[in-house]
Image (tube, grey):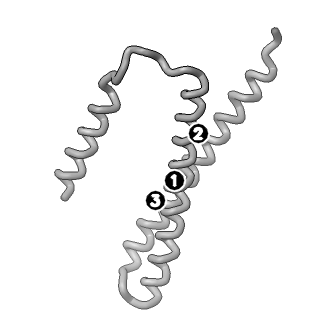
Amino acid sequence: MIQAMNFNTLKSIDSAVTPKSPVSPTPAESIKEFSSFLTDAINGVAAQEKNVGTMNEKFLLGEVSADQVMIASEQAMLSLQLTTQVRNKVIEAYQEIMRTQI
């Protein structure tokens, strides 16, 4: 299973690295791509937090071990911290652009 995941990861990285077209996207397309990336990332964090809630309930019922619950909660916490840091950097970049004098 781990080997299959690594192969899929390498395959997706390879497709991301290979240029798809020599034409650069327009600013509107770039904004749309960035917003969809952020939406997907936030939805992923929300899904991880729902998974932690499910794991907690299963732990109370004795269906999963404490290790599994801790791993799921740490993953959700790290994802939330990463999302917060990305948000902070975006706000910082916006504020820097607003301070730029023309």
Camera-nearest residue between 89 and 14: 14
Q: CB atoms at circles 1 and 2 under 8 Å apart?
A: no
Residue type at mark 1? Ser
Is 37 positioned to the left or the right of 66 in the image?
A: right
Q: CB atoms at circles 3 and 1 under 8 Å apart?
A: yes
**Residue that numbered label 1 is attached to:** 79
Is 81 positioned to the left or the right of 58 in the image?
A: right
> 10 Å neighbourhood of mark 3: few (<14), some, or many (≥20)?
some
Camera-nearest residue between 80 and 19: 19
Numbered badge on residue 75: 3
Numbered badge on residue 35: 2
Is 29 positioned to the left or the right of 87 in the image?
A: left
Camera-nearest residue between 77 and 18: 18
User: Mark 2 or mark 3: which comes first in sequence?
Assistant: 2
Q: Dividing the picture into quarters, in which one does residue 59 lie?
A: bottom left
Against 53, residue 96 (above or below) is above
Q: Secondary structure at mark 1?
A: helix
Residue type at mark 3? Gln
Instruction: Give how far across and how far down residue 18 sits, in percent.
Output: 30, 24
User: Mark 1 or mark 2: which comes first in sequence?
Assistant: 2
